[in-house]
């Protein structure tokens, strides 16, 4: 039981560090292009290099520390897969909310009390619905 928890936690950490590495490399490319076009400075590039190096070093240290048999376990693989599942779940929630707002805008369903329709505005269609506090 404890061995499975350690494997799952290690997979979760390696998956998170892998995501951090990919994000740092993405911003390294974006920052390098911005630096070449002179639209951003060195701090973006240096930050992306440092975050990529920290993530790569942490991943390497964790893989080096782990036993080779642990990386093939089902718990470790579930830990690796947990990060993408969490990200897809978070993105799906935002997608559903955005789709709901778009439908309300397109179908005019928001006119019944979103808070902005009762104000003196030229057109309620120009105002996005704001949730009431």
Image (cartoon, helix red, strand yellow):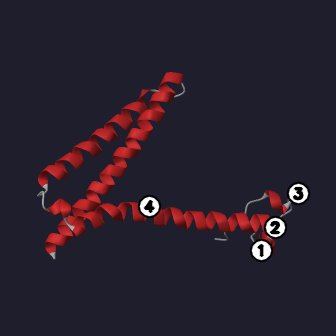
Q: CA distance from mark 2 to mark 3?
A: 10 Å
Mark 4 vs mark 3: in front: 4
Residue sitting at x 13%, y 56%: 66
**Which structural element holds mark 2?**
loop
**Which structural element holds mark 3?**
loop
Query: Which disc is residue 40 wearing?
Result: none
Mark 4 vs mark 1: in front: 4
Q: Quadrant of residue 124?
A: bottom right
Q: Which residue is mark 4?
A: 87
Residue sitting at x 77%, y 74%: 113
Q: Are marks 4 and 1 in contact (CB under 8 Å)?
A: no
Packing grade of label 2 (10 A; few <14, some 14-19, many >=20) is some
Q: Which residue is mark 3?
A: 122
Q: Is residue 35 left or right of residue 82?
A: right
**Which structural element holds mark 4?**
helix
Pick whichever of labels 4 and 1 is earlier in the sequence: 4
Q: Quadrant of residue 74?
A: bottom left
Q: CA distance from mark 3 to mark 1?
A: 16 Å
Q: Is residue 116 visible?
A: no
Query: Which disc is residue 113 wearing?
Result: 1
Q: Which residue is mark 2?
A: 117
Q: Is residue 100 left or right of residue 19?
A: right
Q: Are marks 2 and 1 in contact (CB under 8 Å)?
A: yes
Q: Is residue 121 visible?
A: yes
Q: Is residue 67 left or right of residue 16?
A: left
């Amino acid at each position: 039981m404890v061995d499975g928890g350690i494997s799952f936690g290690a997979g979760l950490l390696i998956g998170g560090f892998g995501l951090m590495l990919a994000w740092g490399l993405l911003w390294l490319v974006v920052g390098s292009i911005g630096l070449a076009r002179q639209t951003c400075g060195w701090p973006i590039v240096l930050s992306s290099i440092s975050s990529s190096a920290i993530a790569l070093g942490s991943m390497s240290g964790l893989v080096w520390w782990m036993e080779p048999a642990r990386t093939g376990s089902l718990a470790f693989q579930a830990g690796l897969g947990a990060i993408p599942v969490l990200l897809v779940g978070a993105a799906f929630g935002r997608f559903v909310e955005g789709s709901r707002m778009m439908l309300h805008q397109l179908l005019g369903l928001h006119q019944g009390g979103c808070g902005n329709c009762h104000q003196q505005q030229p057109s309620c269609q120009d105002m996005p619905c704001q949730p009431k506090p």
